[in-house]
Amino acid sequence: MEYTQYSQGYGGYPPQNDPIMMLNEQKKAEKHGIFVAAAKLGALLLIYEGLTYAMNYAYYYVLYFVKAGKFTTSFSTVREFFRSDPGSISSSFYNMLGNLFIVVLSMLILMLLAILVFKVELKSMLKPEGKLAAAGVKWFSLSMSVNIAVSIVVSILVSILSTVGVTVPDQDFSMTDSSAGTLIMQFTYVILIGPICEELLYRGVIISLLKPYGKGLAVFFSAFLFGYMHGNIPQFASAFAGGLVFAAIAVKYDSLVPTIVMHIMNNTIASIKDFADVLGVSEDKSNQIYYAVVIVCAIIGMYLLFVRFSELKPKEERAFLLSSGERRRGVFFNVVMLVYLGIVFIQYIQSFISTNS
């Protein structure tokens, strides 16, 4: 017979016609696809870590060249120069200028690598449509309300821990000087460029790579990695919670435009007191403006949370052979991803130790 060699165990049919074997092969293909996507994502995140580290050094070399009027390849020379005049780089202006330099150059290189080498498709998520910007305005209050609610809970927990002598590390974004130049730099970096760069990576790249293996999967890891990169627990919690809303909206509209608008609005409100200080507005007045805006957003956000939130639940376009748990583990325990997670986790530990030492 033609299929005699397959008769034992396959009822006379070739293995490729066996439903169980075909199902297993499809599962293997799905698992392999997740492995490749997670490896690409982990590699891009590692590259971004390396780029920001390298650009940090590059910034000091460039600043040394501008201030000293000469170039050197010796970083010890650069370090000693700024140690002798720490005020020249310790201001909010130079801190934000450095962040702008580091983030823009690192993100530019990363996006070129993502698109040209790792073949990440981002073009479809950058559609400049007015209705998409309007969607960002519509949903912004929800993300802010969720963020505030989680921040309050975290603040209470941090206060409780402080009573037993445990200090939880956090970042201080307060401005040390209130010049017009600092205000311009704050607007450029914190309100405009920073949000665009973060959305490109933490919503654009992550969702584009993982969405083919589940919209829910993409939403979860977009939020988790966005929170995780902040390097401290309070910001992780609030950024993760708000990031779930951001990612769900990016998936719902298949666009970064709404989340870029939301991110800009969020950072603008967070900067109200800084702007007021530079413009000479009294602290009482700036507090009144800030809390009035927050209360209005909270009221709208509660309405969206309890009445419209179901609209953001990701609707999968196809069924998956692997369970959601298997797909999550496939991303989380990918060897390249584990290296990235481990490096950032070391930063968490170092920050906690230095704060409590």
Image (tube, rainbow, N blue to C red):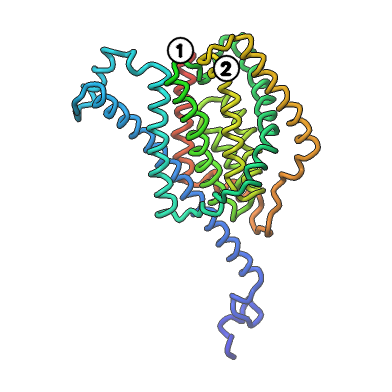
Q: Give coordinates of residue 58: x percent, y percent.
A: 30, 32
Where residue 133 sits in the image (x, y, percent)?
A: 62, 42
Considering depth in this image, is 240 or 343 the residue closer to the camera? 240
Q: What residue do we see at 48% from left, 43% from top? A: 337
Question: Disc 1 marks which residue?
Answer: 357
The picture quadrant where one finds residue 240 is top right
Whole-percent x, y for residue 351 in the image: 46, 21
Marker count (numbered): 2
Q: As drawn, which residue projects farthest toward the bottom? A: 1
Q: Is residue 103 left or right of residue 64?
A: right
Q: Identify the mark nearer the N-term, 1 or 2.
A: 2
**Residue 330 shows in the view:** no
Which sits in the foreground, 209 or 325? 209
| 79 to the left or right of 332 | left
Amino acid type, callout 1? Ser
Q: Quadrant of residue 145?
A: top right
Q: Amino acid at mark 2?
A: Lys
Q: Is label 1 in a helix, a strand or a loop?
A: loop
| Closest to the observer, 131 or 50 | 131
Residues 146 and 128: in front is 128
Residue 54 percent location from the top left of the image: 33, 34
Look at 50% across and 15% down and name the residue there.
278
In the picture, the disc for residue 280 is none
Q: Is residue 49 left or right of residue 80?
A: right
Query: Mark on residue 273?
Result: 2
- Image position of 96 with respect to 249: above or below: above
Query: Label 1: how many residues lie within 10 Å, few (<14), some (14-19) or many (20+)?
Result: few
